[in-house]
Amino acid sequence: MEHFSHEHPLILREVLKEDGEDRVCYACLEPIAGHAYSCTECDLFLHKTCGDQPRTIELGFHPQHPLTLFQRPHYVPRTCGCDVCGRIWKRFTYSCKPCRFDACISCVSGKIRNISHDHPLISTDALKLDGLEVICHACQKQIKDHAFSCSEHCDFHLHEECLGLLKPSIQHFSHTQHLLRFHKRPPFNSSRSPCDYCGNSWEHFTYYCEDCRFKLCVPCASLSAADVPPEIEHVLHPKHRLSLFVRKRYSCSTEPCKCCGQFLALLAYGCELCKFNICMSCASCALLPQLTEPSFHEHPLIIMREAFFKCDACGADDKDMSYLCTTCKFWVHKSCALLESRIQCGRHRHPLTLSYSLPEEYVKFKQSCGICGQRLKPVYWVYACSPCRYFAHVKCATRGETENFRNGESQIREDQEDLDSNLTSLPIMSYDSRNLMISFLRDVSLKEIQRGTELHHISHGHPLILCDVSDNIGSMETDVLVCHGCTQAITGSFYACSQCSFLLHRICAELPHEVQCASHPEHPLVLHPKAPNSFTLFLCQACDRISNGFSYRCDTCDFEVDLMCAYLPHTVSHEAHNHPLQIREPEWLPCNGCNFNKRRVLGCNVCNNFFLDINCALLPRTASHRYDPHPLILSYPPFDQHPGEFYCEECQQEINPNLWLYHCSECDQSFHTRCLFPWNSGRGIRQE
């Protein structure tokens, strides 16, 4: 190939060590191993990556103009300081002559060397670094998107803009006498050292003048003279303007800032007449807009420097700039003070309005955030949709990931489409169906058997005969037939004893002797026709209901469940939630249907804040009540079509609108789920 940097043709070949000597790339001065360009007439070598670099490029560090590749820096004496890594450089350089911006070829070609770290740095996406919070080693702030990270996985990261700031030496307007030189650690062998500009203690990169012992942290070193006016006005000292001045070094620790109370550094703003002095951080805040008539507070607010405090708006202990009321000490994050009054949140279909406390009419019910599921404290600000009774923490509603979460739901559903088609769908139609278990026992096939077929079952001493509810069986023709196995009403075919009143659903009669239960995966469960006690009752350890029907039991763990819970699949879908629900390990969690803490629940692994106990998961889609001639429909919040309160027709108590209920839209009548299906109603007990 013909290359602009050399007069002879170059050929691509594999470069091997000769006489133990390493070959070095003419462009980047790094050792060469493997394929490279070389000259057959002279001793010149180029990495293939260096030789293939284009003559002009666009670089994110200098977006104003394209950069042109030169064989050597075009300055006299043919050296330059790389504006990306800070090294003194004398070989292949990308330059913008009008702006005097230079970047060595190493920084452009992928791996960047910087004075701040021993290993090369590579461009990375901070969001993909193991899901952990990524902190910039220069400014100590979080990196939220693009980063430069150590190629040797040292957990070293820099903002792109911070990487461009780190140079071997700088000239700073706050100390014009000498150059300030870069140090990886504060001087004087100290683990922490206060910056002479802002006064903050600093334990990381420092710019330092050895002659004057003047030092700057990286954020302050990045400031220019244009950022710091010679005089300012401050709301705490309206009589006079404050002037920038340099204090005596040995008095630095003796005078506090009149605004924040921290000790003043070398540089400060002050009024010499009134002896009113403030630190540089508080002075920089004074240049930002003040809130003279905030809509959420009766007094003017002044802006304050970054600090850790508990915000009176969101309740979070965060480090942020803030607005403070000097009259009553009301203190809020700057980000909270500037919240929009109305937003569109990806987790709710209606716009949300900012409320400066939880509306009083909803305080009587414990409200939870519609996004994170945590309880809301009435005194803190929320975003609310009043018609739907939907509330969210201000931080949750404004977090950027919220919209991404919503946009990603369609993709999540697509990924699980094949899985969902095979899941058991809840809610079940009704408790009066032929048998609730028929929804769960997909692997059980009932073969065609003629009526009158005789069966000997381990649960009963007499032979059982296959019948149908349409048959007249002695005195049972007018009775409600109840299965001795699952204790539910019988419809369709069943087995009956001609000598006594023993009845079994056909499906209950043909259950396997041993099953693997999702609620107890450690051991198989064995079928037991009777409870092992004199009362013939047992407590189902999945749904907490008492029963006298068949059970499946693990004698090793003393674990026992009724038939319904034994066959409940590990994963189901429910129309109340967009994602599949899975049986969780035993853990006390609040049920979204009834708000009671239950030990065994079905949970969503996508949202991680939606849980259903077994009883709520098995509530039927429709129910009936003597007070209403129509079917009652199981309904879930938010109830945007019903702005008024709900009152239970059974107990006459108001219904918490955050919980499930049964409702008849024609009669506008509602019922607690617990009033229609109380957990202690004895529904699992067969009456003799």
Image: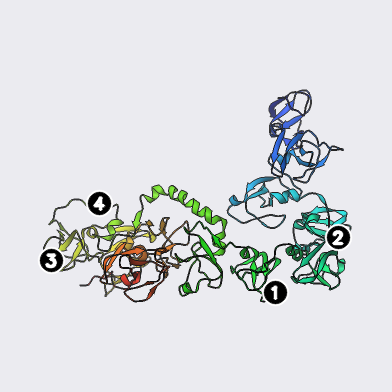
Instruction: Return the residue at label 1.
Output: 326
Relative to residue 423, is residue 628 depicted above or below?
A: below
Instruction: Return the residue at label 2.
Output: 213
Q: Residue at x 69, y 31 (%)?
A: 52
The numbered mark, 2 or 4, whose residue comes first in the sequence reads: 2
Who is closer to the viewer here, 490 or 672?
672
Q: Mark 1, mark 3: which one is toward the viewer? A: 1
Q: CA distance from mark 4 to mark 3?
A: 28 Å
Q: Secondary structure at mark 3?
A: helix
The numbered mark, 2 or 1, whose residue comes first in the sequence reads: 2
Residue 646 visible, this angle: yes
Type of the residue with mark 3: Glu
Q: Secondary structure at mark 1?
A: loop
Residue 510, located in which quarter of the rendered image?
bottom left
Total labels drawn? 4
Q: CA distance from mark 2 to mark 1?
A: 37 Å
Task: Name the side, left or right, on which 431 lies relative to 143.
Answer: left
Who is closer to the viewer here, 390 or 423?
390
Residue 17 visible, this angle: no
The numbered mark, 2 or 3, whose residue comes first in the sequence reads: 2
Q: Residues within 10 Å of mark 1 (few under 14, many from 20)?
A: few
Where residue 24 sits in the image (x, y, percent)? 76, 34
Residue 596, located in which quarter of the rendered image?
bottom left
The numbered mark, 4 or 1, whose residue comes first in the sequence reads: 1
Instruction: Return the residue at label 4.
Output: 445
Q: Mark 2, mark 1: which one is toward the viewer? A: 1
Where residue 501 sits in the image (x, y, percent)? 16, 68
Q: Residues within 10 Å of mark 4 (few under 14, many from 20)?
A: few
Q: CA distance from mark 2 to mark 4?
A: 87 Å
Q: Secondary structure at mark 4?
A: loop
In the rendered structure, find residue 477 and report the number of the disc placed on it: 3
Task: Name the side, left or right, on which 578 lies relative to 52.
Answer: left
